[in-house]
């Protein structure tokens, strides 16, 4: 018969194992793919992985804060589309005579941030579930982007903005350094600011957080605005990497971002996990995708594997002892 001590330490071991599971999975993946194809650890391929992870990492930083609240943000693709559209149409391009340079980048990030604040206001003041509020903003953003682009692709011809993808610093594309800067900002917000602590508190228990004096409405609006900021930065990076903006520039970005956050160990129920978990999750998704390409796996099978990975990650991250009802 198990003693109280064995139950306690058994519970701690399971909790500790669950916390380190994503990192162990990442290490195991790297080893297995390297054994199957040694080209995986070539410097050129590692730089390719880092470059591929830049946009998903920046997007996932914003989404992490919303999931930590216990909510969801489906406006990822709409916000990214708007940011990319604003960047391309205000910088030098092949559709108009604008040439505002880096002011276009600032305007793009500001537009996406404004969309985030608007989403937060809609969600909190109209008391609409985040799922529905952000779904609406997703399609509004996508519609505005397609309308402004006239349904066609517009090329980004500003060389300084294109250098975000083409220029290198210390052997890595500048976009990778921008993504790492976004990660450091997210870490600072989560671990060293009152906003980060309040987001974790609300995700852990909204009623308790409110009784503690936390202004739920203000924190939610700030969190959505923060997410919009990261989506805007990701939109600029996507436009710089592709050298254009069109109706499909954001396709699949939401799925990749949600996968990375969940696989990294951030609980969909909120209050558990964080941006460091998301960094590991982004690396797992990117490494797995790169490995399957190196091994010649069909794209259809790759999507199936990603779907299975989400189910497995959610199953591992849930604390079933706290679940009384599964809706």
Image (cartoon, grey):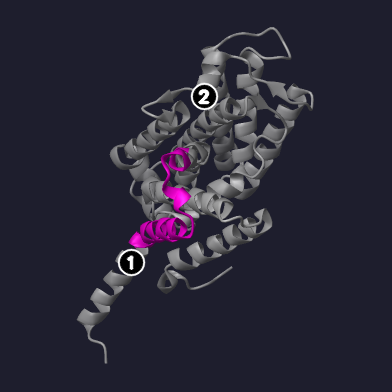
Give the percent coordinates (x, y) of residue 43. 41, 40
| Nearer to me, 254 or 121 | 254
> Does the rendering let one see residue 70?
no
Give the percent coordinates (x, y) of residue 174. 44, 26
Residue 7 falls in image quadrant: bottom left
Relative side of 113 to 270, left or right? right
Q: CA distance from mark 1 to mark 2?
A: 40 Å
Q: Find out whether residue 42 is within the magenta segment.
A: yes
- Quadrant occupied by the C terminus: bottom right
Which mark is first along the chain, 2 or 1? Answer: 1
Helix, strand or loop at label 1? It is helix
* Residue name at image x 39 percent, y 53 percent: 273
- Quadrant occupied by the N terminus: bottom left
For residue 105, above or below residue 260: above
Helix, strand or loop at label 2? It is helix
Relative side of 305 to 149, left or right? left
Q: Residue furthest bottom?
A: 1
Main SS, magenta residues? helix
Magenta highlight range: 19-47
In the picture, the disc for residue 166 is: 2
> Does the rendering let one see residue 188?
yes
Q: Which residue is mark 1?
A: 17
| Other residues around mark 1 within 10 Å, as few (<14) / some (14–19) / many (≥20) | few
Q: Residue furthest left?
A: 5
| Other residues around mark 2 within 10 Å, as few (<14) / some (14–19) / many (≥20) | some
| Nearer to me, 327 or 37 | 37
Give the percent coordinates (x, y) of residue 263. 47, 56
| Nearer to me, 137 or 302 | 302
């Amino acid at each position: 018969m198990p003693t109280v001590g064995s139950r306690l330490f058994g519970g701690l071991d399971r909790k500790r194992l669950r916390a380190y599971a994503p990192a162990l999975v990442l290490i195991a993946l790297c080893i297995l793919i390297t054994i199957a194809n040694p080209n995986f650890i070539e410097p050129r391929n590692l730089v390719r992985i880092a470059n591929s992870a830049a946009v998903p990492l920046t997007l996932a930083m914003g989404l992490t804060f919303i999931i930590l609240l216990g909510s969801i943000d489906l406006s990822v693709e709409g916000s990214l589309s708007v940011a990319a559209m604003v960047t391309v149409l205000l910088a030098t391009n092949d559709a108009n005579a604008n040439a505002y340079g880096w002011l276009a980048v600032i305007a793009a990030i500001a537009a996406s941030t404004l969309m985030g604040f608007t989403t937060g206001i809609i969600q909190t003041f109209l008391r609409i579930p985040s799922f529905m509020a952000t779904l609406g903003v997703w399609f509004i953003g996508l519609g505005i982007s397609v309308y402004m682009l006239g349904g066609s692709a517009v090329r980004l011809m500003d060389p300084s903005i294109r250098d975000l993808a083409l220029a290198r610093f210390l052997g890595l594309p500048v976009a990778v350094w921008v993504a790492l800067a976004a990660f450091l900002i997210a870490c600072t917000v989560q671990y060293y600011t009152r906003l980060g602590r309040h987001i974790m508190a609300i995700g852990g228990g909204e009623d308790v957080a409110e009784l503690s004096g936390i202004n739920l409405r203000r924190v939610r609006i700030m969190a959505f605005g923060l997410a919009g900021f990261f989506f805007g930065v990701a939109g600029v990076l996507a436009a710089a990497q592709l050298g254009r903006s069109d109706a499909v520039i954001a396709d699949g970005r939401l799925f990749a971002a949600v996968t990375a956050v969940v696989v990294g160990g951030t609980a969909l129920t909120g209050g558990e996990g964080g941006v460091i978990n998301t960094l590991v999750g982004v690396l797992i998704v990117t490494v797995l995708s790169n490995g399957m390409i190196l091994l010649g796996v069909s794209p259809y099978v790759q999507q199936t594997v990603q779907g299975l990975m989400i189910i497995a990650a959610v199953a591992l991250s849930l604390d079933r002892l706290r679940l009384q009802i599964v809706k």
